[in-house]
Amino acid sequence: MPTAHEPGSNEPHIPDEAELEAFDVDHDGHIGVLDSERARLGVVDARLEEVAHEGGVKGKIAEVAHKVIDKLDND
Ligand SMILES: [Ca+2]
């Protein structure tokens, strides 16, 4: 049986400290589904904020969406 890590294998990715620092939102030492979801929300949120600053109708919609995501993100 091969023991080397083959590209495309199903071996779990072991996150290093920098990755944990960046993605482990709930600080349980693992990058879980919740962490990736929160990270994804953060990216969307940053983009919405950008659009909101552009103003206009699109900006208004983005501003409202940004507020909704902010609410979801507060715990
Ligand atoms: Ca976590």
Image (cartoon, grey):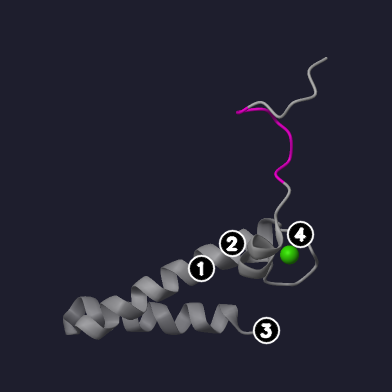
The residue identified by callout 1 is 41
Nearest the eye: 12 or 59 = 12
Q: Secondary structure at mark 1?
A: helix
Callout 2, which amino acid? Glu
- Hey, which quadrant is residue 71 in on the image? bottom right
Q: Which mark is residue 66?
A: none
Residue type (three-letter) at the residue carrying disc 1: Leu
Closer to viewer: mark 1 or mark 4: 4
- Which badge, 4 or 3, comes first in the chain's sequence? 4
Pointer 2 residue = 37
Instruction: Tell me how far mark 4 sits from mark 3, CA to CA.
Output: 19 Å
Residue 10 shown in magenta? yes
> Mark 4–mark 3 contact, CB under 8 Å?
no
- Residue 35 covered by magenta stretch: no
Q: Is residue 58 above or below residue 12?
A: below
Q: Nearer the viewer, residue 74 or 18?
A: 18
Q: What mark, if any, has residue 30 been given in the picture?
A: 4
Marks 1 and 2: in contact by CB < 8 Å? yes
Label 4, ligand 1: CB separation under 8 Å: yes
Measure how far apart labels 1 and 4 are at the Cα level.
Answer: 18 Å
Q: Position of residue 45 (x, y in %)?
A: 43, 74
Q: Nearer the viewer, residue 15 or 10?
A: 15
According to the picture, the residue beneath numbered tag 3 turns out to be 75
Question: Where residue 64 sits in the image (x, y, percent)?
Answer: 37, 83
Residue 61 sits in quarter = bottom left
Quadrant hosting residue 74: bottom right
Name the residue at 44% across, 85% down. Answer: 67
Is residue 4 left or right of 7 when viewed as pictured?
A: right
